[in-house]
Image (cartoon, coloured by chain):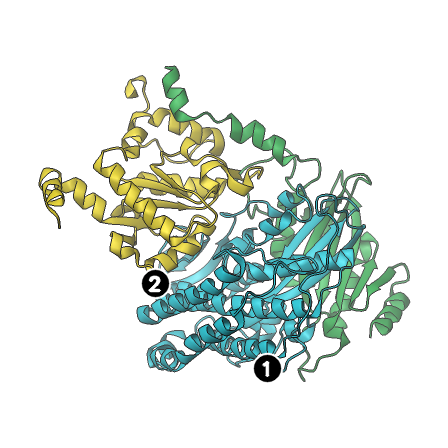
Chain colours: A yellow, B cyan, C green
Amino acid sequence: MDRNQLIKWLKAPAKMSHKYSLHAVYFCTGCGIIEVPPSITARWDAERFGVLPAASPRQSNLFLITGYVSVKTLKAIIRTYEQMPDPKFTVGFGSCPINGGMYWDSYNTIKHLDKYIPVDGWIAGCMPRPEAIFIGVTHLWTLIDKGMANGYQKYRDRYKYYRANQEQVLGTLDWPPLLPIGDGNE
Amino acid sequence: MRELDLYFGPQHLGMVGNFSITLRAEGDRILKATANPGYLHRGFEKLMEYRKWIQNFPMVCRINVVEPDSMEMVYAMAVESLAGIEVPERAQYIRSIYLELARVGSHLFGLWAYANMLGFDTVAQWAMYHRDLILDLFEELTGGRVYHIYIWPGGVRRDFPNGFKDKIVETLHTIGGCVPEYDSAFFHNRLFADRAKDVGKITQDRAKEMGATGQVLRATGMPYDIRKVAPYAAYDRVPWEVPIREKGDAYSRIWVVRDEMIESVHMIFKLLDNMPEGEVYNRIPNPFKWKIPAGETYVRCESSRGELGLYLVSNGEDKPYRVHFRTPSYPHGLIVLEDVLKNASIADVGNTMISLYVVAPEIDR
Amino acid sequence: MNKILRDELQSVFGAVRITTPENTRVIINAKKDTVLPLLRFLKEKGYQHLALISCVDWIEAQELEMVYILSAYLGSDHAFSDKEQTNVILKTRISRENPEFQTVIPVFQNAEPYERELHELYGIRFKNHPRLVPLFLDREYSIPPFRKDFDTRRYVKEVFDQVPFVEKEAEKV
């Protein structure tokens, strides 16, 4: 550990701990999941970067949205995301959550994931290689260091708009709002 | 005892893929299982009606992520059958080698999932590493790790690069050399037998009634394999056997998978030895203006999960009129799974599902 | 093999039209009400494997075409013959305005999800189907999405592209 790191640890221990223990939700949302098993096993070994799959959303702070999001999956994603404790980081994996990718004209996939939940970073490509995951993770470290991976705060502040967008696509949601929706949420 | 509904997936540790099962359980015993697919429905077949014949090649391979290659094959076969395109002999051999490599990779992925689920973490790590070696071969051949888009109507996109044959042999020797280790650590392990025997058992008659193919049917003692029954590519040029088992449970199915991998590797060696020289593709018309005469066809091939079919209708335009894939996981995931889970215990759900080799995107399409 | 099958079919069901475009493919065009007896007959002849039920929307003729694809499993002696190589494609046309058809579950048990799928994607109602509930979709569509007059690109523009970006929406206030 170099001296810089030591100062960082002393200044903001919580931040450093979040950074180096990113536990990903075990949720295969799309075809991008095919590159996750190689990344977490012996050849690429994501544990070098502190990334591990976690059993339940309650124990995890990283949400990899791997691939296209159909309307039915969006519901599951929102529920899973709301169950995760703060601070939580979302990374869109692959081209499809960014702008629809090759399913841009599909009647059953949503095109821009960040309209429905906040996303802290994107890994472009179809499929992104395991190296791309690790580059994404190191970028996420930088963002966490600078306090820019603040999607979960954004979700709190703008919950009214996120919820409105979710309802626009999913119809009436069958779970109560996570936060009170009033005018004073801005 | 009280009955309760248990939602198994999509976010669940025992679940591989974005799929969900609703279990009605009484204590530990499952009274009724209801498969709930559709989390990955993109309407592929509709989207393909909007794209030109050649533009659909990147689409089809995304239907099954674990083994995209047989999807390319079946679509290329259907287009060739409608347009009347011949494939050169060398391309047939290359296609077979490529598809068998993909089958080994896909089976290793299945072995990873199954071993991981049973708690054999070491074996799972090996399997995933060995699959990666095969992906390296694909990367050299086609440029892509997961999606290759290598098979083309009228042949394959390009010939094997220099020295690629030796590389295939070397990689397969590396993997094959580990078979004794796999055997002693997993296949001959008593724990595997204890955990997998008599789980998810089906008889041959039931399997036939439910439309099962692939390992599910071969594990009940019927050597039904499209590569043998209705040979395509170069599968009738070399001798090979269809491995079968008799019991029809998870144990038999995983053994069939193991035997198939070994058979595939032997087949690749034989195909490499007999490969003729020559062209690897026949010219097709300008793909942007390519119109295929009206007609319909049903072609099938053996993917690593069972019979993969494609019903393709053309009305003489530059786009397909109707595409419908018959994917092997469809009956396995929706009919066989619901049937086998009846009266099973909750602990066996993951075991049954992974041994049936269900891949969710293939069901939803 | 195909010739024998053809003769038998024509002697039992007079009104069917049979074509064999390739050696391994038999296409049978049948009337709506003969589908169930035909399937039963073919099953007895050894075509036990219902591989696929599909549907084609012929919008110009205002008809939906039901397609049943059958093939044969191996017999008890595990021998290969022409029969296993053959695919039998049975087709019939139904009205597009009022799409209703009988279920084939009494003959082929594995027809259940295929019919559920067609009900959802083409709006065909299958009489006496035990579980005609949605299979894939979570939303309601005004026209069943696989019909030719459902334009998915327009639908995307009208629904998904109308959802605003949260940042822009928040800046407005």
Answer whether residue B344 is visible to the viewer in this image.
Answer: no
> At x 46% / y 66%, what residue is drawn?
B134
Q: Which quarter of the rendered picture does the N terminus of chain B lie within?
A: bottom left
Instruction: Using the image as rendered, state which of residue A145 and residue B3 is in the foreground.
Output: A145
Left or right, B71 with respect to A159, comes to right
Judging by the rendered image, the residue that carries numbered circle 2 is A43
Q: Pinpoint residue A181: horizontal percent, then vertical percent.
A: 33, 24
Chain at tag 1: B
Above or below, C163 against C94 in this view is: above
Chain at tag 2: A
How many C-alpha atoms fall within 10 Å of the one at disc 1: few (<14), some, or many (≥20)? Answer: few
**Corner quadrant of residue C107:** bottom right
**Corner quadrant of residue C6:** bottom right
> At x 56% / y 48%, what residue is drawn?
C135
What's the residue type where badge 2 is placed? Arg
> At x 89% / y 70%, what residue is drawn?
C7
Q: Pinpoint residue B45: horizontal percent, then vertical percent.
A: 63, 47
What's the residue type where badge 1 is placed? Glu
Circles 2 and 1: CB atoms closer than 8 Å: no
Judging by the rendered image, the residue that carries numbered circle 1 is B241
Tell me the CA gap for discs 2 and 1. 33 Å
Secondary structure of residue under mark 2? loop
Answer whether residue B152 is visible to the viewer in this image.
Answer: yes
Secondary structure of residue under mark 1? loop
Above or below, B324 against C59 in this view is: below
